[in-house]
Image (tube, rainbow, N blue to C red):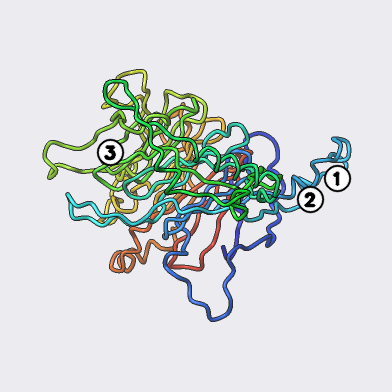
Amino acid sequence: MNGADEVVAAAPGGPPPAPLDWKFSQVFGERTAGEEVQEVDIISAIEFDKTGDHLATGDRGGRVVLFERTDTKDHGGSSRRDLERMDYSVSRHPEFRYKTEFQSHEPEFDYLKSLEIEEKINKIRWCQTANGALFLLSTNDKTIKFWKVQEKKVKKVSEMNVDPLKTVANGSVASSSSLSSPKTHLANGGCQSFSSLSNDISFPPGGIPSLRLPQVVTSHETSLVARCRRVYAHAHDYHINSISNNSDGETFISADDLRINLWNLEISSQSFNIVDVKPTNMEDLTEVITSAEFHPTHCNTLAYSSSKGSIRLIDLRQSALCDSHAKLFEEQEAPGARSFFTEIIASISDIKFAKDGRYILSRDYMTLKLWDINMDSGPVTTFQVHEYLRPRLCDLYENDSIFDKFECCLGGDGLRVATVLSQQSIPCFWLWLW
């Protein structure tokens, strides 16, 4: 992020809040001068949890790195009155520290399709916490994994049983027991005594002093352990572009270009196909699924976007296979405005629900649109992002930059939306008030 701009569009009721004060806060993984960036170290996914206290990043090497917010813990022992007086949540920038990392995905090879599956992390989604443990989903192109990260007490070897009395006693018992004639049981219940063992095996007087047994104790030190609890595989023929948690805390969806599957977090052996846009004849294919997101509070509602610039809201209570949508959100094309690039730049690359679930934010190549789920006639407002690139669409098409995908997000207060500009210009983070 090389810069940031804030554009005030409108504020729903009352004056707009004061502009944000952008300041440099932290950097992780800063490289030295002249050091080349390795391909596997490039970040491909990033996600905050709902509290904002934890940050997860995934890279092209299949690794997931977790960071933990520390500035709130510094005031854990302060009283509420002291916290209100300091008002540190406003005056201080959030501070994060490295927490742990683990290898989420490895490169694989699909022998049936002769296809290499790279380890790059496409999406990360945080799940509900339980008993002090962190849970998250991570996915590459084909496989989704459910991870549990928890602190566990370290077990150490404190001492060996060096007490000579105990050693002698143990040795004496072993020696005396070995001198007794062992018995082996025969087929019909009889037994046969062997006294030859006492002649073949002999123990020195006083036992074996060199025999040492470790004593393992649990220390007060703790270490973070990441464990893969579930692996959800073999359910997508095409590359996974989205995963989204349900508000019920039990299910999630995964989407590829043609299908959306519903999973139970505790069942990895099967999933339910709830959306299928694959035509009988692939030559008739006109649009694909680009993004999918669960409603933040209604567990039966989800939305997905398409390459034609439309957003469909579906209700899982209507039918098992949601062939029809409850609502369709799309902007009517202006007469005479159609060109060769119209469908390409209209493709929606990302959608996000607002925190209250009332609005949907969508991002296509040229604009950022905000939709009201109660008004399907058109977007509430449209933010022009790449209008300055419209005269250069031919050049962008030739170098494939017109197919770049961009994500978007909404602030926790619901008043700010943000996205990233094209790589054709200086990388910049734009923020709007609406």
- Mark 1: which secondary structure? helix
Residue tagged 2: 91
The label shown at residue 72 is none
- Mark 2: which secondary structure? helix
Of the image marks 2 and 1, the number of the one nearer the N terminus: 1
Left or right: 320 as drawn, with respect to 296: left
Please give the count of numbered marks on the rendered protein. 3
Residue type pointed to by label 1? Met
Q: Quadrant of residue 399?
A: bottom left
From this viewpoint, which residue is outermost toward the bottom? Answer: 34
Asked if labels 1 and 2 touch by Cβ distance under 8 angstroms, the answer is: yes
Kindly identify the residue that appears in the image at 29 percent across and 31 percent down.
275
Residue tagged 1: 86
Q: Residues within 10 Å of mark 3 (few under 14, many from 20)?
A: many
Q: Residues within 10 Å of mark 2 (few under 14, many from 20)?
A: few
Kindly identify the residue that appears in the image at 26 percent across and 40 percent down.
258
Of the image marks 1 and 3, the number of the one nearer the N terminus: 1
Q: Nearer the viewer, mark 1 or mark 3?
A: 3
Left or right: 1 as drawn, with respect to 321: right
Q: Nearer the viewer, mark 3 or mark 2?
A: 3
Residue tagged 3: 235
Kindly identify the residue that appears in the image at 28 percent across and 56 percent down.
341
Distance (Cα) linking label 3 and label 2: 48 Å
Q: Looking at the picture, how far across and down is residue 352, in whole percent?
A: 47, 40
Q: Looking at the picture, how far across and down is residue 279, in whole percent?
A: 16, 37
Is the C terminus in the top left, top right, bottom left or bottom right quadrant?
top right
Q: Residues within 10 Å of mark 1 (few under 14, many from 20)?
A: few
